[in-house]
Amino acid sequence: MRNLAQRKLLSQQKSRRTKEVQEEKQATEEIMDELIPLQNNPPEWLDEEATKEWERILPLIRELPVADLDMALLAMYCQTYSNYLSATRNLEKNGMVVETERGSKLSSYYTVQRDSVNTMNSIAPKLGLTVEARLKILAPKDDKDQADPFEELMNGE
């Protein structure tokens, strides 16, 4: 399993490289494949909604190069999702505007909802939970790197 959800696998990166460098990159990926897989059980500190999200995502995320090293990031995503749901439900029930002694103001649940969206949007690509991130992770290997004649000239080849 790999902890490179936002970056392409080393063997997928497009650059002009020697066979030795290609073999080194392949060996690194093989070592990454030996990382401990993501655990089945969610962390006990997740609330009920976050635990449901963990259980929903887990079989899907196992299809991606995610390891136990990513557990905290996945747990944060799930808990933030739960926070988003809670804030959204509260906003539906009580409205977005709160009356105070000093007048009207936005509900603090709106801030929680907005911040949760921003946090989830930050974490999701790191775990491969967006289409764009999955396309980068799962792109087929391209061993036919194109030689750049200008690079050869600059390198004195």
Image (cartoon, rainbow, N blue to C red):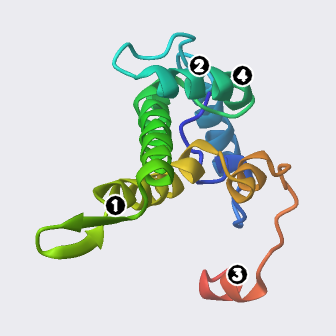
Q: Residues within 10 Å of mark 4 (few under 14, many from 20)?
A: few
Q: Answer with left or right where residue 47 lies relative to residue 7.
A: left
Name which of mark 4 and mark 1 comes first in the sequence.
Answer: 4
Q: Position of residue 116 (x, y in %)?
A: 43, 52
Q: Residues within 10 Å of mark 2 (few under 14, many from 20)?
A: few
Amino acid on which disc 2 is placed: Glu
Q: Are marks 3 and 4 in contact (CB under 8 Å)?
A: no
Name which of mark 3 and mark 4 comes first in the sequence.
Answer: 4
Quarter of the figure with the C terminus:
bottom right
Q: Residue at x 68, y 88 (%)?
A: 153
Q: Quadrant of residue 1?
A: top right
Closer to viewer: mark 4 or mark 2: 4
Name which of mark 2 and mark 1 comes first in the sequence.
Answer: 2
User: Quick check: 143 above or below 71?
Assistant: below
Question: Between 68 and 54, which is closer to the camera in this rendering?
Answer: 54
Q: CA distance from mark 4 to mark 2?
A: 19 Å
Q: Answer with left or right where residue 54 lies relative to residue 59.
A: left
Q: Answer with left or right where residue 26 lies relative to residue 104.
A: right
- Say which mark, if any, is on residue 68: none
Q: Which residue is mark 3?
A: 152
Name which of mark 3 and mark 1 comes first in the sequence.
Answer: 1
Q: Residue at x 41, y 64 (%)?
A: 96
Q: Residue at x 86, y 49 (%)?
A: 140
Q: CA distance from mark 3 to mark 4?
A: 46 Å
Q: Which residue is mark 2?
A: 34
